[in-house]
Image (tube, rainbow, N blue to C red):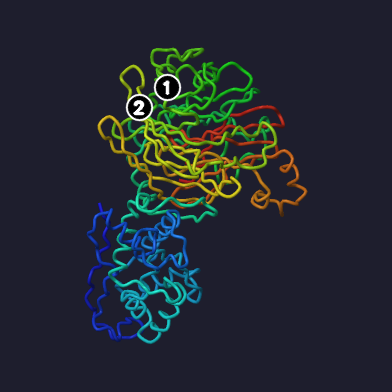
Amino acid sequence: MHRLWVVIAIAACGNPKGADDADAGIDAPVAPVFRNPVNLPDEQLAVEALKIVGGDVPGAQQQCNGCHGLTRQKLRYWRALSDTAMASCLTDLAVTSADSARKMIDCTRAMPELPTSDFQTTKLGVYATATKLPWFAFTFARAYGDVEGAQKLTEFQASIGMPQGDMPHLTQEQFDIVAEWFARGVPLLDETLPNDPPPQSCAQGISADVAAHVSAMQTAGWRAINRTNMMAMYDCGTATDPKQCLADKPFGADQAYGTGWDVAGRGRLRVLNDVTYSSSYWTRSSPDGRFVAHGVANVQGSYIIDLQRGAAQVTIATQYDPAFFPDNTGFVFQGGTRNVCAMSVLTANPTSITMGEAACSKISTVGLYEHVGRALGDGDFFAIDSQFESDDGGKGPTLDDPLATFTSLGYTDFTPMIFNGTAYVGKTRVRVNQPFEGDSTLSPSARLEMTRVSGPNEQQIGYVLRKVNATLSGTTYAITTPEIARYCLSGGKPGFSYDERWVAFHHYVTNADAQELGFSSASDPGFAAFKSKGGANVYLMDLRTGTPIRITNMQPGQYALFPHFRSDGWIYVQIRDTNTGHEYTVASDAALLLE
């Protein structure tokens, strides 16, 4: 459905004209329309909007492209800024009072609480192209009166009005088209604009789609569904508040394990398992938290740890890459004769799994480093895979995040699956091109995808969050993945929470982290051990804000890795301690405390 901004005509209140009411010189105390709805279909609207801003389409005008490279990434960044402007600054398009007008204007300053601070174009996004249209003139006059308002408007236009220089400004009709396209979420951008060049930098931006998705998942996502279905969470007993679960597990900060693991106010780590073997690549657990699975170095096969049976090690004839479906009905484990099994294989309490069980099947289109989800409403199961970078750090000094060697041929493959009552059966695989992105992960609902993005020298420059639109067409799917956010951070593959508000990821300690870890600089003698032994910490990030929160405090030679959520909000983490030769599976309640 198209989102249309509606301006409500507000009648005059009869107050004397002046700075407080600020309608002196205005023929009628009713705000001009900010923008008019445009009823063009998406495909035509995209072309017309790109022509106006100067995108690489036939008939493009010289407008914004005089100063900006109009790539897909740039336009999505502007879209995110514009969504934020509407949600945070342009909140009263009817301009119902002088106070409201001043608040909207000050919101566009670097420091909104300081009326003399600079105006910033980023506070308006694409709406900076409307600063010479009637609505802004009315708003400044409403806020400050005719004379002072005109002076401040001139300053405002000179500071952040777009386009700058001698380029012609947008007419109201042109702005209406551009604003309509951005308000709809820049539909068909990928189909209309040529591919971007290799990314050289990252511009962080979070569109309104993210908050809308998070809000919807509070009641419709897999955390809510599993709670409604009374999924029995591991070690919760009769507790109804998940924060009361795992109460009998020892804290990681206990001297028996290691001091300094916790960050004050950001949860505490409880130890679920302590072993002397070395796991291989990532660790994942079942939605109920009962089973913990990973490859194992220097042994035949892998392990699935059954915490409910006293951390029993179930040997499974696979190699790596475990994943569990969010409804707790099945799992994927790569490197065996078959790779997808029903959960009944595990809940039968075996001592070993051959992958030849009747409830296991081989779906060859599911590639390595896969992540899985299930569509809501009893929908199909999905697995995704992409170009990837192997990450098995911490077995020796690891001093940087994994490279991002993703090319112009980057892609994500989607493999839909159904359960036929005995085993899982794959449908036709669908490939979506995503140049210079890889290490794709899928949210539990299969409605979001997050990728790592390659930059100069094959270094990661950020994460991209994509909305997954999967439409069943016959026996296969039509899938699009428009970008809805970009986060300028570096780290390993992230894990989504079951309410799809959070992601958690690990980040290897680098010189740039020295001050955050409490040292004066990377030259501080106390930081020297990190330079030789390395380390890794886990970060939690709210998708709506993009602010990373460190939730572990590992010491040199200790690596907190492969964080992932169980359904009720606890985060499981694998800790490699090269100082002791032990590995620990731990659980953090950080997301539960911060929510």
Q: Residues within 10 Å of mark 1 (few under 14, many from 20)?
A: many
Tell me: residue 93, above or below residue 218.
below
Q: Residue at x 66, y 48 (%)?
A: 517
At label 1, which amino acid type do we have? Val
Of the two numbered discs 1 and 2 on the same chain, state the one appearing first in sequence.
1
Where is residue 37? Give x, y as percent: 24, 63
Frontmost residue, 236 versus 288:
288
- Residue farthest to the front, as pictured: 58
Tell me: residue 115, above or below residue 502.
below
Residue matched to label 2: 417
Residue 250 in view here: yes
Going by the image, does 33 lie left or right of 275?
Answer: left
Quarter location, residue 221: top left
Label 1 SS: strand
The Cα atoms of the two marked residues, 1 and 2, are separated by 10 Å
At label 2, which amino acid type do we have? Met
Q: Quadrant of the C terminus?
A: top left
